Amino acid sequence: MELIPAIDIKDGRCVRLYQGDFSRVTVFGDDPVAVARGWYDAGATRLHVVDLDGARQGRPVHTALIRAIVDAIPIPVQLGGGLRDAAAVAQALELGVARAIIGTAAVEDPDLVATLVARHGAAIIVGVDARDGLVATAGWTRAATVRATTLVEQMAALGVARVIYTDIARDGTLTAPNYAATAELIAPHGPAIVASGGVGAVDHLIQLRAIGVEGVVIGRALYTGDLSFADARRALA
């Protein structure tokens, strides 16, 4: 199971939100490139980067900063936030991003996802962000009427190979992931599931591995020191 540190960018800084609330933001660094180098030095094999301003505005905002992160480290970066058309995805991949995360567009324009998967294959990931089982879009500011389980099934039918699932109510809380909701998305021939939201202890990682997720995105717990990346790696070795 891959451990993936998260770097969320807002106003050019490395931040964390609490339950996806843009009014409850904590700044953990003024230089996201330096933060990225730090996670690489700590042994990360991949980074999860989100352009929060892009997610809210519906278009990429921090393109130059993303390029600087990609150029600064020799490990793959997966990027989300504002990637809502083919041109934005192509631009992200041209920056050197290894995986482009499609969120809002997966709900609003599934035909676009089918086109992107046909064009870019496994470089396209779908981000399924849910609150009480219902998917949220537009940087978690709008609630859709589709259930997370239904959306994952739809994306699987389009050939999506990988889904990042975030339980918004758990995100930033450190209280534990939503194991039951995550397990519902795992199917023998379905997309690989990367879990996100609520991780705050090594035991949480061990339980996620037991239910069969491919990877875990970890954010606030690493920045607050509640979870040591080195301890997490040792526990799962």
Image (cartoon, rainbow, N blue to C red):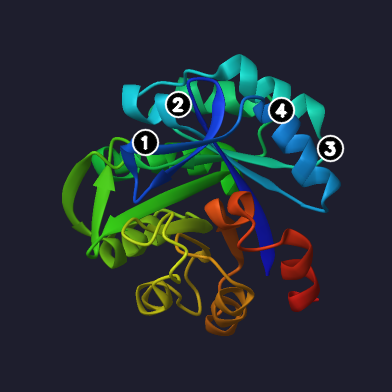
Amino acid type, residue under disc 4 in the picture: Val
Q: How many other residues sit within 10 Å of disc 2, few (<14), some (14-19) or many (≥20)?
A: some
Amino acid type, residue under disc 1 in the picture: Leu
Outermost residue toward the left? 145
Residue name at image x 26 percent, y 54 percent: 135
Q: Tell us which disc is closer to us: 4 or 3.
A: 4
Amino acid type, residue under disc 2 in the picture: Ala
Q: How many other residues sit within 10 Å of disc 1, few (<14), some (14-19) or many (≥20)?
A: some
Q: CA distance from mark 3 to mark 1?
A: 30 Å
Q: CA distance from mark 2 to mark 1?
A: 7 Å
Residue name at image x 66 percent, y 33 percent: 97
Compared across the picture, whether 183 is left or right of 95 comes to left
Q: CA distance from mark 4 to mark 3?
A: 13 Å
Compared across the picture, whether 30 is left or right of 73 comes to left
Name the disc covering residue 86, or none.
Answer: 2
Asked if labels 1 and 2 touch by Cβ distance under 8 angstroms, the answer is yes
Q: Tell us which disc is closer to us: 2 or 3.
A: 3
Say which residue label 1 marks: 112
Of mark 2 and mark 4, the one earlier in the sequence is 4
Q: How many other residues sit within 10 Å of disc 4, few (<14), some (14-19) or many (≥20)?
A: many
Asked if labels 3 and 2 touch by Cβ distance under 8 angstroms, the answer is no
Instruction: Name the element at disc 2.
Output: helix
